[in-house]
Image (spheres, helix red, strand yellow):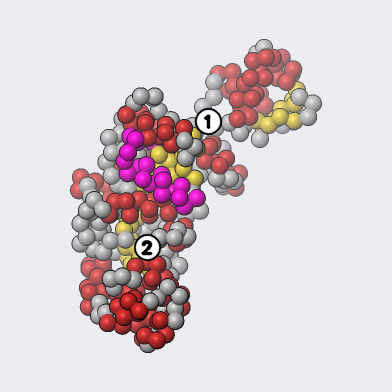
Amino acid sequence: MSEELVFQIALELIPGVGNKGTKQLLSYCGSATEVFRAPKSKLLKIPGVGEKMAKAVKEASPFKEAESIVYSSEKIGAEILHYSNPLFPKRLKQIPDAPSIIYKKGHGDLNPQKSIAIVGTRKATSYGKNITDKIVSDLSVLGVTIISGLAYGIDIQSHKACLKNNIPTCAILAGGLDRIYPSVHKKYVEEIQEHGAIITESIPGTKPDPHLFPARNRIIAGMTDATIVVEAAERGGALITANIADSYNRLVFAVPGDVGHTFSEGTNKLIATQRALIYTGVEDLIYHLNWDVSLEDDKPKIIPELSEQEQIIFELLSENRSPIEIDLISAKSQIPINQVASHLLSLEFKNLVKSMPGKKFGLV
């Protein structure tokens, strides 16, 4: 058992220190071990550490409890990651209220090249479930890890879609790793660990009490490049996650829904108030996150759904390596030129076609 790990956990257990105080103490002392060895006079010289915190550190004796947590974690096969550990999620480390320690079970990489959160209502409609399946399926060729919260509805649908498409997925829990909630989703947890991981900041044995869920949501938002809200009522956990992601300057996307439908109120409001970008397809992620999908080896280019005439024009341009004039596109496709112009504009918006001098068009 690592002495430093025990001291890292012990520091977390001291009332009044918190994540911010822990990081401040570690940054000046260099390690948790040195924090406890430092004289009170040295601790008092650290910015933000007052008499109360310094006294708490010097009088605290949480080491047996910390050792017990290490044993409990080992017993359930959990890995303890302190934020100084290179395996700790780098994206999560960037947020101001990041946890100092997380507990992980699974083989997944917590620092993937691309990471997206998918969240939504617990009472998902068939529309929401189908959209979730399509989002995950579209992302399957882009090397993306998908993060969610294992909850009913959209969360579990995203995890199930990942397992179906063989995509890495991480489930963030509110309670301890040995307290899976909801228990009905235990059957997915083992497979999730094979493809990714289950993660929490709660020590083993912690019950998933209601107050822990908003804190869980900040980890979902913090571990990802962007959050997609599929369905949400006007109030709910998914909107909390979206607002947290926005506060971290991470992109938020929302899937538009039927006006007047309860579980479209939240997503439509996010779009209407410009707190979220509209999600119409994976090309929206590629564009706004500036993903260079051309570097994906042996992976096909994502082609959004096209109308019959758009497909004809796209195939025509694919067959011609050089850009061709709009008149020639009309002649070869047998589509009136005014309709060709409209379809070309649509293809440009879908990032498939680009216009060039001389009224010529070619593929992006």
Spot occupied by residue 97 in the image (x, y as percentages of width and height): 40, 60
Image: magenta residue range: 230-249
Assess disc 1: are there few (<14), some (14-19) or many (≥20) residues with their C-alpha within 10 Å of its C-alpha. some
Q: Quadrant of the C terminus?
A: top right
Tag 1 secondary structure: loop
Q: Is residue 341 magenta?
A: no
Residue drawn at point x = 37 percent, y = 87 percent = 39
Image coordinates of residue 271 in percent, x first then y, are 46, 34
Count of numbered badges drawn on the protein: 2
| Residue at (22% x, 78% y) in the render | 64
Tell which residue pokes out farthest to the front in this image: 51
**Quadrant in which residue 164 is drawn:** top left
Q: CA distance from mark 2 to mark 1?
A: 39 Å
Q: Residue 20: horizontal and vertical position, in percent? A: 40, 67
Determine which of the numbered discs, if any, sits on residue 304 in the image.
Answer: 1
Mark number displayed over residue 99 = 2
Quadrant in which the N terminus is drawn: bottom left
18 in relation to 7, above or below? above
Q: Could you say which quadrant of the image residue 40 lies in?
A: bottom left
